[in-house]
Image (cartoon, rainbow, N blue to C red):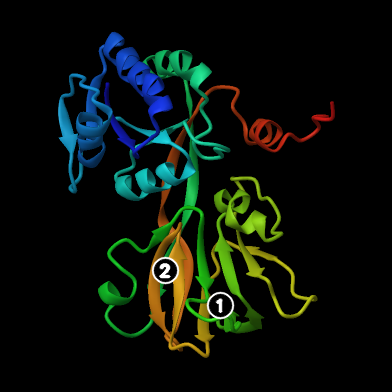
Amino acid sequence: MNIGIFGSPYPEEKQGLIAHVFEKLVELDVGIYVEADFQRFLDTSAGLGFPVKGLLGKGDFDIEVALSLGGDGTFLRTAARVGRQNIPILGLNTGRLGFLADLNADELDGMFEELCRGEYRIEERSLLQLEAEGGEKEETVGTYNYALNEVAVLKRDTSSMLTIHVSIDGELLATYRADGLIVATPTGSTAYSMSVGGPILVPQSESLLLSPVAPHSLTVRPLVIPDNSKISLRVESRSAYFLVALDGRALVFRTDTPFSIRRADYTTRLIKRQGHTFYKTLRDKLLWGIDIRP
């Protein structure tokens, strides 16, 4: 098995864990490939030298599994790097909460052994695709216009609210006056959307979620719609620009630039340990049903 390792710069106290990852993979005789930028960090800053079969550059790569070392942010960057290559991703959580990267350090040895035996589950997760309507796509949207968690429309450099006109499949839904609007996948329902009061959706829900950020009207509430819907948006602002963030990657749009969001035509594949379910993740990460009082 060939595994590609993706990561981000990490604090010194995580060095022992990262070293153990490499040591365990070497013990299991796994072919190790490392993202080029992460390898430079390991060589220069961390001073960790391990035998690798090669580096993963900007093109496609030939590996069976992508291993994300970090938190959910690192996992999202790994998913963007994998893109359409249909390579499943395993997330080892070295960060804090970890909904996507939900494998904990104490599970590492067992999971790697199960991985080599093929004893794991694959979950398919839907993505969002952002499409600019008019103008040069590469300039307006960027070369990777997909998001696993959410697409967020946000004000840029003014305290004034945005006016966001939203239509669903050509029919006007509402004009939101708010600090922003989040369009989230079920995967993203436990991320930014949840922080502004949006509901949690199970990953298998064939739905999209619209969650306003600080709406001017108290009657405006999050809305769940079918994931085969096309969401069209047009934004007005006192500023000449506003932000569109795809999983945190910010793009600058000119005011009144029409754009749309729809479900992407491919999925991201997540590796899950047997017995790791979404409901267990909710119990573990959000402490549901656990009395933490002294």
Q: CA distance from mark 2 to mark 1?
A: 15 Å
Give the quarter of the figure containing the N terminus. top left
The residue under the point 51% across, 84% down is: 234
Please name the residue that numbered disc 1 is placed on.
169
Tag count in the figure?
2
Q: Position of residue 293 (x, y in %)?
A: 84, 30
Q: Residues within 10 Å of mark 1 (few under 14, many from 20)?
A: few
Is residue 270 placed above or below 218 in the rendered structure?
above
Q: Position of residue 273 (x, y in %)?
A: 52, 24
Q: Position of residue 172 (x, y in %)?
A: 62, 85
Please name the residue that numbered disc 2 is placed on.
130
Q: Residues within 10 Å of mark 2 (few under 14, many from 20)?
A: many
From this viewpoint, is residue 286 visible? yes
View extreme (left): residue = 54
Give the quarter of the figure containing the C terminus. top right
What's the amino acid at mark 2? Leu
